[in-house]
Amino acid sequence: MSKKIYLYGNWKMNNTYSETEKFFEEFTPAYAPLKADANLEVGIFAPFTSLWPLSQGAKKNGIVFGAQNVYYEPKGAFTGEISIPMLKEYDITHIIIGHSERRHIFLESDEVIAKKVKAVLDAGISPVLCYGETLEERESGNTFTVMERQLKSAISSLIPAEVNKIIYAYEPVWAIGTGKTATPDQAEEVCAWSRKLIGDDKVVILYGGSVKGSNAKELLSMKDIDGALVGGASLKPASFLEIYTAYKG
Ligand code: 13P
């Protein structure tokens, strides 16, 4: 039996409310032939303001969906933040936590990310925990030290049932939005290493960083890569779904 593939799209700061509605006008017929494929799980992560049309489109198509960030406190004086109870009213199933753009542009610390992961788990939602090294960290030989710090700080205080519920996404910063993909061997090396560090053979580990139809097959065929977290190529239904059809060949 072939393995299950997770195809998750992170729209980042793209797709307005009306653009999200348009996306689903195209997505629904394009996804129809794949809908019954039990080996495929599709997910989409939209900006907060597009969550309503996303929820409608996602429910209609039976795909998972969620937000790209959240604050860990349930309510209070946190101007500009969005809480988990606010998101739960949209029936979201997943939330991306610790994306490299949150870590590097918005300076989110490992400590804040750990609190977010725990709060999301406590709410019965699956965190999609992103981690990965910068080019400088890779070139200075610190890839695994950095990732060990990022992963351990997020999971070390959790119980095994919580650790298993997290979806892990290895996203080398130098491969994000650059067109420069990690080689299948580089991605596999880190994903296999992560699985050992996490200590559970069955956790879901995605690779993210310039994934597209033309490189999907070689990346997704690797043993320890369970799927892709896709940025740019997820913005259009055709380029997004092509990643899975290319993998299937
Ligand atoms: P790209 O696919 O645009 O490189 O983005 C990857 C990513 O950051 C997904 O979270």
Image (spheres, rainbow, N blue to C red):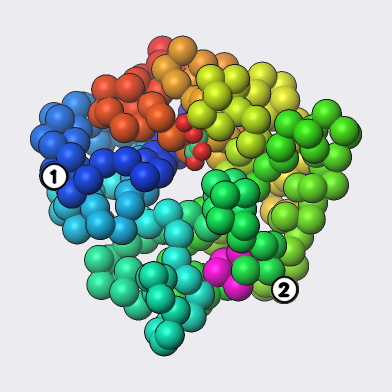
> Which stretch did the figure color magenta?
113-117
Comparing 49 with 211, the one in front is 49
Vertical placement of residue 7 versus 114, above or below: above
Residue 166 at what x, y percent from top left?
Answer: 56, 58
Residue at label 1? 18
Residue 14 at what x, y percent from top left?
Answer: 32, 41
Vertical placement of residue 150 versus 27, above or below: below
Is residue 44 in sight in this rendering? Answer: yes
Residue at label 2? 157
For label 2, the SS is loop
Q: Residue at x 73, y 31 (%)?
A: 135
- Residue farthest bottom in this picture: 76
Q: Residue at x 64, y 36 (%)?
A: 173
Q: Residues within 10 Å of mark 1 (few under 14, many from 20)?
A: few
Q: Is mark 1 within 8 Å of ligand 1?
A: no
Residue 163 at what x, y percent from top left?
Answer: 63, 63
